[in-house]
Amino acid sequence: MRKIIYKERFEKELIFIVEFIAQNDGYHRAEKFYSEIYEKIENIPFMPYRFRQNQTTNNTNIRDLIYKGYIIPFRITPDTIEVLGIYKDNLWIKQ
């Protein structure tokens, strides 16, 4: 099974989103969203190619997990799943 690696960019973007949810919808909803995101990500290593290919890259190893309208791009390598970031309506640009 591939190891999951969370890139710093993902962590920063997720914290920003969770803080926004907490301010607008309450702490409980933000906490629930946070835990559900990680739960979904933990299932990626089981058949990672079942997710759609990322539409901003031309790389078959970069895929998108979509959850509640948020797109979580990740890179598949032989040994790892690298979670790259998270975004919604704004365009995510690979760095």
Image (cartoon, grey):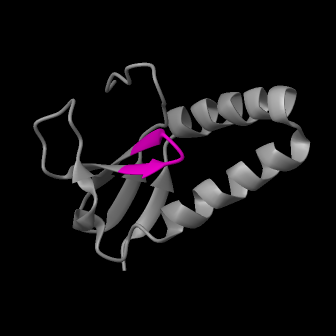
Q: Give the range drawn in magenta.
A: 65-72
Q: Main secondary structure of the magenta part?
A: strand
Residue 83 position, x and y percent, is 43, 49
How many numbered callouts? 0
Question: Where 65 sits versus 39, above or below?
Answer: above
Query: Per the image, is 40 magenta?
Result: no
Q: Nearer the viewer, residue 74 or 37?
A: 37
Image quadrant in which the C terminus is located: top left
- Residue 23 falls left or right of residue 65: right
- Rendered residue at 60%/66% (across/down): 39
Question: Where 89 sits versus 51, above or below?
Answer: above
Residue 92 position, x and y percent, is 38, 24
Q: Nearer the viewer, residue 61 or 77?
A: 61
- Residue 94 falls left or right of residue 24: left
Q: In which quarter of the image is residue 13?
A: top right
Residue 60 position, x and y percent, is 13, 50
Query: Per the image, is 68 magenta?
Result: yes
Q: Which of 69 and 53 is in front in this view?
A: 69
- Residue 94 falls left or right of residue 69: left
- Rendered residue at 37%/59% (across/down): 81
- Rendered residue at 70%/50% (across/down): 34
Residue 12 position, x and y percent, is 62, 31
Image quadrant in which the N terminus is located: bottom left
Question: Where 15 sits versus 64, above or below?
Answer: above
- Rendered residue at 76%/55% (across/down): 32
